[in-house]
Amino acid sequence: MTESERIEKVKAGDTRAFATLYDVYVRHIYDFVYYKTHHKQTAEDITSETFIKALSKIQQFDNTRSFKAWLYVIARNTIIDHYRTSQREVVVEDIWDIESDEDIVRDADTAMKVKELSKHLKKLSPIQRDILTLRLWQELSYKEIADIVGKSEANCKVIYSRAIKTLKENISPALMALVLTLITH
Amino acid sequence: MKNVDQIVRELFEFDPSLKAHEPEIRTIVSQYLMSKPDTKFDIAFVKALRAKLLSTTEAPVARPIVSSFISSFSHFSRALTLVGGAVVVVLVVAVLFPGTETSTIFTQQFNTVGKNSFGTLTLGEGASHKEDTALRMGGSNSVSELGVYAEETPVASGMPTIGMIAPDMAGGFSGGSSGSAPGKLIYPYPVTYYEYVYAGDELALTETEGDVYNRVKGTFRAREAASALKGFNLGLINLGAFGSMKLRYFEIAEDKANGYVLNVNLVEGQISMYPNYEQWTMYRDYTPLSEQDMPSDEKIIAIAEEFLKDYGIPRDMYGDPVIEHNDFGVPIPLMSEVQGASGAAPAMMVDVASTPDMPPEMPGAISSKPMPVYYPENVTVTFPLLIKGDVVYEDGGLPYGLQMTISIREKKVESFYNLVSQEYDVSSYDLITDMETLMSFLNANTVDETYLPEGVTIERGVVKLGTPTRVLMHHYMYTDNKSEELFVPALMFPIIDPPEGSYYFPKSVMVPLPKDFLNAPSPRPIIMY
């Protein structure tokens, strides 16, 4: 059975067919949400909300488009809603926009691991961060990334390379030496 | 981890100006990749959310299916009609309505009992797994088809053959024992043992306890059925003279063209169906089937689904049907194809030329002339059982559930097996929580080489496993001369790179999660050669 056929079955009321789609995509969505929240419980809550929303809105889904991309868009919007409820003055799309000393829950080991990286990622726009994450951490194709962020493949490649350039301009010689040492051993 | 060189090369293709800053670019990319967090992906969470999503529809409504299920079978055999329809109803009610008036055995019911209530999950002695061994390996040959010397080789009961290293079967052709000439030996071919290596996504086993389900086979109403029969005097024996009777099995048959026989096992709470052979016309037609006769998968599934609907068998407790294609369009190979470039016949093959008493037209024979392609008369469709949203599998990776045989010739259901009652006792057990223990356990169940005959060549290989799925494993436990039917949490790992040239290598490996399995006695080895 193709994915489109399965989606049609879901639209006809077959929840079992949705469970099969869930099995395929839950890891992708969960990891994506985690990369943007750095907190297991928050990621689980948002992932749950994403799939519940997807099931409730399945009738509105255009079956000629990418279901995977649709799930990612729902997840992305749910994350934005999550941070919007914090009543901030500045719009926050994900954890990278939040200062490390702020009172937002995050997993300590993840915070440590990304500490150096986060200094640089704050300088990027949310879409640049998303494209880097989707490409480097989730290894999605440019076509998939384009469907998720709503831009053309060519545009995504440009945004990607510009993000790398921006990071390059901010990298310190000390960090460069450290990383080069690590990767050559 | 994605290769830094590949990523950097790709960037330079988009923007050649970046090449001038290659060291910095490499640093950034490397740092980005090294900083990738462990997302703490939790299978327990996945399972819980899955169950929640599945429960968003209306709960399955108990269907009093006696009237639809049994009334679908008409023209009961004359003998039973003479006894009286009331007796038939009592017999059927005994199986289908063991509990309340509004429930049937096909409505899933769960009774939570204390932790570890079923005892050690790997108790029991003397189970023989000979017939199942090849199926556990994911292939379709049975050991007997290979003509092995060994008689039944018992495995310590309760110890599933997970991690059993599938010997690499050179050639993969099922030279049947029926084809071996008297006095001809079947020599052992090289045996390859594989180590399983996990190559899937990062995995955290955070579920410390899991539910084990024990199917209840209560048949107390079978006594009522027996009581109803007590007054039935056959003229040969007085049933009333017997005390404490319990009806264990009965069959009822449709006395019409292409009718069915229903076999009802009150002890196991199980119903199966097969053709009333005296009345089936297809068994009188021996014209071989051709490719044009073969229906599509969609057609096969439609036939199966329609049968369930027509006969009132609840669909809710089953997942997507799975078709077994093992024998579909399998050509009988030429000897030259089997020999390959070397011209040497594999050790397991019987040379037809030296066995003149075996005609080459027999299935399983190797011939020097082209043979017709075999198209099977029927195909099996399995509807995998779902328990609280989890799919149930046998420990060899095949789906467990309602098995239906579809007649290709008649384009209809020929038989079904394993329609069982759905009441479960539920008890929680401690689970394995670290991957290292799990993989060590998996690889510890290798075959003992001391059981191999002399002169057998042993080769070693590695097999990679992909990201697992959380499932339930069907498992028998034998205690006090009884067989308990359990369903235990397990992980099913897909095999992502089966060895080349291996015909019947399994598609997946099942690992039960309850810690009880870690302490089970090691199985005696099962050798296939």
Image (cartoon, coloured by chain):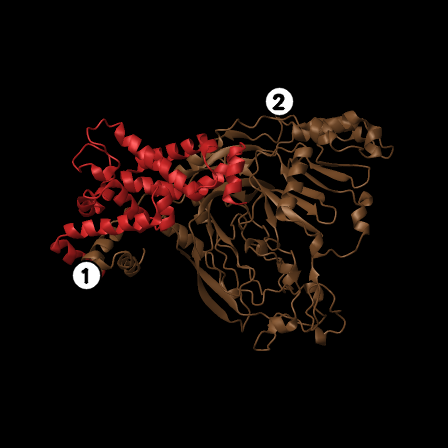
Tag 1: amino acid? Ala
The residue that disc 2 covers is B102
Q: The red chain is which one?
A: A
Q: Please provide percent x and percent y for residue B100.
A: 61, 23
Q: Please provide percent x and percent y for residue A84.
A: 26, 29
Q: Which of marks 2 and 1 is in front?
A: 1
Work out whether disc 2 and disc 1 sit on a shared chain. Answer: yes
Label 2: which secondary element: loop
Residue ID at (77%, 71%): B357
Position of the N terminus of chain A by quadrant = top right
Of residues A117 and A184, which is closer to you in this image? Answer: A117
Colour chosen for chain B: brown
* Residue at the extreme right: B235
Tag 2: amino acid? Thr
Position of the C terminus of chain A by quadrant = bottom left
Residue ID at (82%, 38%): B256
The residue that disc 1 covers is B20
**A137 left or right of B148 in image:** left
